[in-house]
Image (cartoon, rainbow, N blue to C red):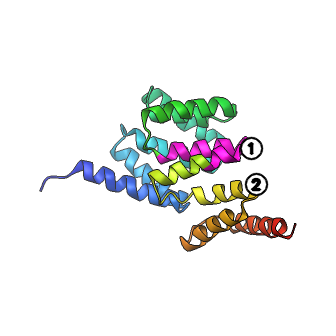
Amino acid sequence: MKRDFAMERILNFQHVHLLIQHREFNQANKFLETLLLIEPSESLWYFFKLFIASENRRGQEIETWHKKITTLFPGTVEAKIAEALLPGKEISIAIKSLDQALTMDIHNPYIYYLLGNYFRMDGDYLNAIKCYQLCLAVDKEFLLVYPNRMHCFNQIGDFYSAFHDLQNILDKSLNINNTILEDQMMANLRQAKK
């Protein structure tokens, strides 16, 4: 029986993506280590390692994966994203790198998610929300969006939408830090009382 490597790659991608969306980063990293041994020329596995390091705010790991990606896969979408995630990068320059990545792959939800994060960090909550919505338009199960978009809705005073995102988080049983949710819920209650 002939192996279908394309189907295996798709299934591996889906598995890692699902683990990441549920913030099961340790499991995703273990699986990615195996994938990198099997397919060391697959840029996507390197990207996922970089993304996890970024989500965990591990500067040295980000720099390590950035170097590997930009050396092994120059000029790719993954390299453009790696440039954006490099610690110490100005937000405006990171956004430009992600915009360039977007011109190369408009169907990549991770780019929209990361753009949303940079706009959110810059206090541009409306553009952040727009990017998060585009991310969900590409991948309706991109669960990492909800806590960040909820924060943006809180910041602009749209507590109904923030509560809707909170409900999505709870309904989808996201494995996220409960203190973040509690802080957001308390912020909603304080704002509602004003």
Q: The N terminus lies in which quarter of the figure? A: bottom left
Which of the two residues, 122 or 14, is positioned nearer the viewer here? 122
Viewer can see residue 101 = yes
- Residue at image location 19% in from the left, 52% down from the top: 3
- Residue at image location 65% in from the left, 55% down from the top: 148
Q: Main secondary structure of the magenta part?
A: helix
Q: Quadrant of residue 188?
A: bottom right
Cβ atoms at labels 1 and 2 below 8 Å apart: yes
User: Residue 136: x and y, percent?
Assistant: 50, 54
User: Residue 12: x and y, percent?
Assistant: 36, 54
- Name the disc covering residue 33, or none: none
Q: Earlier in the sequence, mark 1 or mark 2?
A: 1
Question: Residue 172 vs residue 164: left or right?
Answer: left
**Marks 1 and 2, Cα distance to the nearest angstrom?**
9 Å
- Name the disc covering residue 155, or none: 2
At label 1, the amino acid type is Gly
Q: Quadrant of residue 83?
A: top right
| Residue at the farthest right position | 194
At label 2, the amino acid type is Gln
Disc 1 element: loop
Which of the two residues, 99 or 17, is positioned nearer the viewer here? 99
Tell whether position 53 is magenta.
no
Viewer can see residue 29 = no
- Name the disc covering residue 123, or none: 1
- Residue at image location 55% in from the left, 35% down from the top: 98
Disc 2 element: helix
Residue 55 sits above or below residue 64 on the image: below
Magenta segment: 109-129
Residue 30 sits above or below residue 39 on the image: below
